[in-house]
């Protein structure tokens, strides 16, 4: 297990992610992952459902990278994407709702405005409730979603982008704010691979 970062998610975000991993991997798979990540104390003892910032980024990175160790780059990527999507669907959407992205007025906005407002609401939720630092920059045909302080690759080095869980969270978040449409989300720069920030490019046009 890596040295603690001193940067944290609220316990509730850690709990939601672990529950999503259990949903995707099964109980035995999750327990094996917790052991591998040096988090065996969390077996049958998930973080409490509160907003205290006590779930360390290093532990989140341990889970994210442990999936890849257990299942290989390809299998791990698929599981991490599914876990990210499940974690948003199962509970992180509540954080978006607190930022006004579930209001009736929001639901009648044009799609482009929904994406812009929804992405900013997601970034602001992470900035407000956790030590993750996110920023959204709009371009003509896409959005750049930056994670400047990233919990998925804390002090981790790799030769490729590895923040698949964040891609899944963004994919499901966009599906939620758009009323069920899917969008291409691609991590094009990653701190683990030497970039200054993790950068996700999001197309404004839905898939299909």
Image: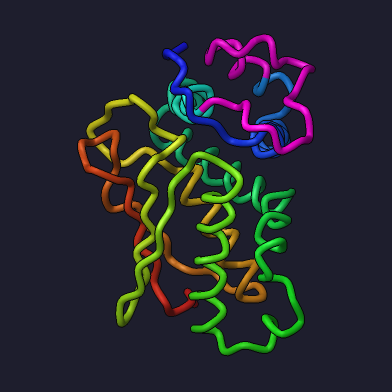
Q: Quadrant of residue 159?
A: top left
Q: Is residue 36 magenta?
A: yes
Q: Is residue 143 left or right of residue 21?
A: left
Figure label count: 0
**Up-down relation of residue 98 to residue 36 (above or below):** below
Q: Quadrant of residue 18?
A: top right
Instruction: Measuring from the top left, give residue 147's x and y in whole percent.
Output: 39, 48
Instruction: Measuring from the top left, give residue 88's x and y in whole percent.
Output: 65, 51
| Residue at horizontal 41 percent and vertical 37 percent from the top | 74
**Up-down relation of residue 48 to residue 128 (above or below):** above
**Up-down relation of residue 13 to residue 114 (above or below):** above
Q: Which residues are magenta?
A: 31-56
Instruction: Measuring from the top left, give residue 152's x and y in whole percent.
Output: 45, 35
Residue situated in front as seen by the camera: 106 or 181: 106
| Residue at horizontal 42 percent and vertical 14 percent from the top | 2
| Residue at horizontal 55 percent and vertical 38 percent from the top | 79
| Residue at horizontal 32 percent and vertical 80 percent from the top | 141
**Up-down relation of residue 197 to residue 39 (above or below):** below
């Amino acid at each position: 297990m890596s040295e603690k970062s001193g940067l944290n998610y609220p316990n509730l975000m850690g709990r939601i992610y672990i529950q999503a991993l259990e949903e995707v991997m099964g109980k035995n798979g999750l327990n094996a992952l917790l052991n591998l990540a040096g988090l065996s104390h969390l077996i049958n003892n998930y973080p409490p459902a509160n907003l205290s910032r006590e779930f360390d980024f290093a532990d989140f990175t341990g889970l994210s990278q442990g999936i890849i160790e257990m299942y290989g780059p390809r299998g791990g990527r698929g599981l991490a994407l599914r876990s990210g999507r499940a974690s948003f669907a199962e509970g992180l959407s509540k954080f978006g709702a607190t930022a006004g992205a579930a209001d009736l007025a929001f639901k009648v906005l044009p799609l482009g405005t929904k994406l812009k407002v929804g992405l900013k609401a997601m970034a602001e939720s992470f900035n407000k409730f956790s030590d993750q630092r996110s920023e959204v920059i709009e371009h003509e045909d896409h959005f750049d979603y930056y994670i400047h302080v990233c919990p998925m690759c804390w002090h981790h080095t790799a030769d490729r982008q590895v923040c698949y869980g964040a891609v899944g969270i963004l994919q499901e978040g966009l599906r939620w704010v758009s009323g069920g449409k899917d969008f291409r989300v691609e991590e094009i720069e990653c701190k683990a691979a030497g970039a200054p920030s993790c950068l996700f490019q999001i197309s404004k046009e839905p898939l299909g």
